[in-house]
Amino acid sequence: MTDTQTPTDIRGELQHLRAAAALLNRLSPDRLNACLCRLADLAESEMEDLLAANRADLSRMDSNNPKYDRLLLNEDRLRAIAADLRRVAGLPSPLGRTLEDRILANGLQLSRVSVPIGVVGIVFESRPNVTFDVFALNLKAGNATVLKGSRDAADSNRAIKKLIDRALADTDLPPACYLAPAERGALQPILTADGLVDVIIPRGSQGLIDHVRANATVPVIETGAGICHTYVDAPANLDWAKDIITNAKARRVSVCNALDCLLLHQAQLGKLPFLLEPLGSTHRCEVYADSDAYAALEGQYPADLLKHANEDSFGTEFLRMAMSVKVVEGIEEAIAHVARYGSRHSESIVSDDEVNQERYLREVDAAVVYVNSSTAFTDGGQFELGAEIGISTQKLHARGPMGLEALTSYKWLVRGGGQVR
């Protein structure tokens, strides 16, 4: 592969990939699992080459860029990636499962079984771990993979792709993975590869997702930006609330399930300094507070971190150590705020009121809604799905963390005995 491929070249690569997908459909799960285990071994044995390529990518990025942490690979992360590859290999195959089986009144035996999607394209920014994750999940689900990464991670992705190719060859599998050039011009031929690519899944900024959605003729599954809220209700365990807020915001600020906006019942306003104390003293989190929250925090939160909120403070995915705070009159206003500013990703309520808990679960429109828990759990691994392909914020085909099942389709099998209509 070179970085000077023409649209015709890219289409040729996709045609080869379509043929590889057809071959994968004939192979046993054991063959696919062997490839994933081989790739895990290579990720550990070739660690220095991977880290050297990653250092080249990191050298081109400002360390203060929110994407820097997403781009970073280190020995611990590579070991975790290898463990995830082996974990995916150990999961039950999602293929060939009978989803429905019945006999019609006319005697036809009707069954619905899970099958691969075929060729799945992933468009993503910065995160080289995605290269491993999506290949592993796609292969386990019998799919061939198109990878379109960004220039930020070009060297890392090329190094990972070499290991994928080695793992496929070492286990006698077809070349079921194509890494497109990092240049932006390589994206459009993939987005319009009807008949060659079955679905495109964008992972990255809202701008990337919007571009893919607007320009693709291939079906798209959106994995949207995460503008996540936590609402602290009037009756709430405040020790829980403090831990949940701190974890959701500070565990890892560059991920899509990180907290962006705290909604606080006005009855809890006096407790706001207590709730945010760890974020101010330990994590140095900027807070964009509305007028009521600002007044409650002034003099009790680090002055250099406390800002007045404006309209842009809400509906923003910060991807850094910053968040907004809005005081609301009650659950109805909290739900309305989420509906206006949320991205339908992950939302949480901290409350001791079971009626309010159930109302929040029912009325908040998001892929994942939590009661008394951190939004940080929105993750395929945490949901025990193995690795994940992304977090879908749409409602067709898949929603929330997308694991193996989301990478399959189904077909109807009909067995007869001479019936005609």
Image: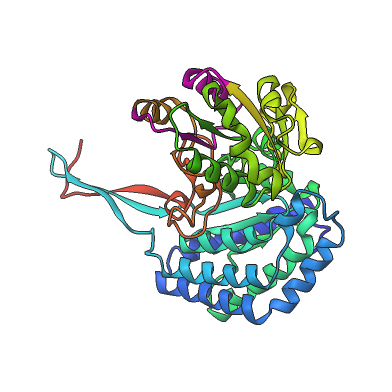
Residue at 54 percent of width and 23 percent of height:
339
Whether residue 82 appears in this view of the structure is yes
Q: Nearer the viewer, residue 335 or 325?
A: 325
Q: Nearer the viewer, residue 145 or 284?
A: 284
Q: Quadrant of the C terminus?
A: top left
Q: Is residue 90 left or right of residue 50?
A: left
Q: Is residue 334 left or right of residue 286?
A: left
Relative image position of residue 164 (x, y in whole percent): 62, 71
The answer to which image quadrant residue 136 occupies is bottom right
Q: Where 150 falls versus 239 (above or below)? A: below
Q: Residue furthest front?
A: 299
Relative image position of residue 227 (x, y in whole percent): 62, 35
Q: Is residue 92 left or right of residue 322?
A: left
Residue at 47 percent of width and 68 percent of height:
87
Residue at 63 percent of width and 56 percent of height:
146
Relative image position of residue 25 (x, y in whole percent): 44, 63
Taking the magenta stretch, the answer to whether it contains residue 334 is: yes
Q: Where 10 falls versus 204 (above or below)? A: below
Q: How many marks?
A: 0
Q: Nearer the viewer, residue 282 or 389?
A: 282
Tell me where the magenta segment starts and ends, as one range.
328-354
Q: Quadrant of the N terminus?
A: bottom right
